[in-house]
Image: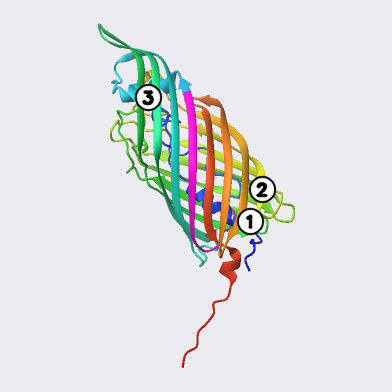
Amino acid sequence: MTRIESNPGRIVFAATAAALLACPDISRADEGGVSFWLPGQYASLAAAPQVPGWAMGVIYLHSNVAASGNVAAARQITVGRIPANVNVSLDLSLRGQGDLVVISPTYTFATPVLGGQLSVGVASWVGKSSASIAGTLTAIAGPIVTTRSGILQDSLTSYGDVVPTVTLRWNQGVNNYMVYATGDIPVGDYNPTRLANLGIGHGTIDAGGAYTYFNPATGNEFSATAGFTYNFKNPDTQYRNGIDFHFDWGAAHFVSKQLFIGLAGYAYQQITDDSGQNPILGGFRSRVLGIGPQIGYIFPMGDMQGFLGLRGYGDFDAANRAPGWSTWLTFAISPSEYAAAKPVRQRFTK
């Protein structure tokens, strides 16, 4: 007989861990509008405890963005390899779209570490990224003036970077805590002269923590995840993104032991200037806020558990960043609490 585990929060992090990925190069923030951290990748039950063993998360992510001004200019300057000592005047608009499938296996250890629960995982992705820039660019170098008008389009179907993640979680009744460390290993398909990429072209280190309040008696839940991203220099462009701060949150209500609905959102703020950019861009610090609905369903799969979740975000109050909207469809499988607690049947032989 299979039953749903008593703590529905244990399954959801397997899906959340799969979302720790670098953003496809479709102009989201920092250099050319692209950041490692994709806001919204954590939502409800981010710090919930896990069942020991292997888990697998798969996410389909669709993102659609548009921008003008400095964000479009930054992409054109990078793609066109315009030197920093060349004065430019730009009247450009940018559009980008990404369709990715993210795969992330995660293993949770049964033996406590520092009194908490240790999990390790890795994520990568395949998919399609497309982008276009339309408008007019004028470059001035001394007496030489060059003007270019038209549309530049690019599309790429390929593979992305590798993102390892380590988490440590503690549970105290309805209160749950988590710390994490992750980063980007830049092995994905990337070329600085392309508009569309699936790698970000440089390494990163990201660390932070999360808190989850979850009361099974009332079905109410709230989670918050915050962290900082340190970016290494892009060796192809000599550009370095500033330090980024990100804050993701989710609030949900379990209408049953299997189904929850709620809201999720994020705040993203770059706190130090970029370096190596064209002077026309200034410090190029990016900012964005986002919010949207979420729904999740937990179901039994033999001795395992399945989770199916959907959430969507709309951006607002963006600066030096291409705002837009995104949807996340998540499917995850993890051990059930019931299966993990079953006694092992011993065999006796003469």
Which three-letter amino acid code belongs to the residue tagged 1? Pro
Q: Answer whether labels 3 and 1 touch (C-beta < 8 Å).
A: no
Q: Secondary structure at mark 3?
A: helix
Residue 284 appears left or right of 85: right
- Which corner quadrant of the image does residue 339 belong to? bottom right
Q: Which mark is residue 285?
A: none
Please state the horizontal and vertical placement of residue 266, each as a whole percent of the image.
Answer: 57, 36
Q: Main secondary structure of the magenta part?
A: strand
Q: Answer whether labels 2 and 1 touch (C-beta < 8 Å).
A: yes
The residue wearing badge 1 is: 8
Give whichever of 284, 56 is nearer the camera. Answer: 56
Q: Residues within 10 Å of mark 1 (few under 14, many from 20)?
A: many
The residue wearing badge 2 is: 260
Please state the horizontal and vertical placement of residue 285, each as a whole percent of the image.
Answer: 46, 27
Give whichever of 337, 70 is nearer the camera. Answer: 337
Which three-letter amino acid code belongs to the residue tagged 2? Phe
For the point 58% across and 63% down, the residue is 336
Which region shows up in magenta? 48-66
The residue wearing badge 3 is: 75
Please state the horizontal and vertical placement of residue 269, each as a whole percent of the image.
Answer: 51, 32
Give whichever of 327, 78 is nearer the camera. Answer: 327
For the point 61% across and 46% down, the residue is 44
Residue 245 appears left or right of 274: right
Q: Earlier in the sequence, mark 2 or mark 1?
A: 1
Query: Relative to 178, is 51 above or below?
Result: below
